[in-house]
Amino acid sequence: MGVNIGSTLIYLKWDYYGIYVICGENLLRERIALMNSIEKSRLFVFLCLFPLILLILNNKLGAESTSSEETGGAQAGDEWTLVWEESFEGNELDSTKWSYDIGNGFTTPDGTYVPGWGNEELQYYQQENVTVQDGKLIIEARKESASDSHGNYNYTSGKIHTKGKFFQKYGKFEAKIKLPEGKGYWPAFWMLPENEVYGGWAASGEIDIMEAGGSDIRKVGGAIHYGGVWPNNTYTASDYRFAQGQDITQFNVYSIEWEPGEIRWYVNGELYQTLNNWYSIDSDTNTQYPYPAPFDQEFYIILNLAVGGWYDGEPIPKTKFPGKMEVEYVRVYEKPM
Ligand SMILES: [Ca+2]
């Protein structure tokens, strides 16, 4: 086995005592000529195994490099393959990946306007509160006035999503996020169905990878919403409590692993919730769709920082503004089926 490095030929030789690098073709020929048949067969076996050894070493080094500081201890694992990544480089949001939600509410398909995004949220979402700098997404909630045809608002903030641009069924979804302290902040990293094939919210499901209330910085929640169309919907949720000295105001890695029939929630690689029991009701026949509906369809990603709403209540005078949600990256992995 020879390789050219500059003008020198380098050969690898194996024998009972180890592996040698031999320079020069003539020297190698002399050595091989001196070998007996057993030594020659050992050399042959080594040369056959050498590509395999390189492959194993390469995989080992590859696995080590994914557990770098930036993953915050999340276990990417050999089985998950990165398929989509947003590192928030440059100085503006990548419009090929993200869109903005603007306003304080939305209009349903039948034309009804739902204020407060259906959650009594107080903020008016606008594009100006979303920036990209120093490799991070920053969503800033401010105490400032805004208004539109539906009303007047005392707070502004930002919300972005990948609907129509990136969506996936199953996989590992993770983000490294830093959150603000203060009652009334309700940041979230979550997912909604790209197509509501089982009906309106929440019959087609909602996956909350992470949501938090600024009044208790020692915990975050993970949840699914499912069942029938509102108000016949339900949800299942759990909280993760941080260890002493850790809280939401530091960068933490929040993720789910979503496989057919099961979703698992992690904080910094630590599993805290496994769900494998849910349902979706067909509102026409009042029967359940086959499991694992509704979590067997494509979902898109949402990042937002709400102010007010039912999760953490309204801000209090002590709540400091502005408050920032900072996102270092979002990564999505797939497991070969
Ligand atoms: Ca980044």
Image (tube, rainbow, N blue to C red):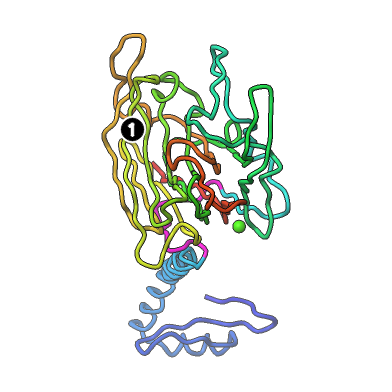
Query: In the image, is 243 to the left or to the right of 307?
Result: left
Q: Amino acid at mark 1?
A: Tyr
* Residue under the point 60% across and 87% down: 24
Is disc 1's CB within 8 Å of ligand 1? no
Location of residue 38 by image quarter: bottom left
Q: Nearer the viewer, residue 33 or 80?
A: 80
Q: Position of residue 158 (x, y in %)?
A: 62, 41
Query: In the image, is 152 to the left or to the right of 259?
Result: right
Magenta: predominant secondary structure element? loop
**Magenta range:** 70-84
Q: Which residue is mark 1?
A: 235
Q: Position of residue 314 (x, y in %)?
A: 49, 40
* Residue under the point 32% across and 29% down: 292
Q: Position of residue 252 (x, y in %)?
A: 47, 58
Q: Farthest residue in the top direction?
A: 284
Q: Nearer the viewer, residue 161 or 152?
A: 152
Q: Farthest residue in the front direction?
A: 317
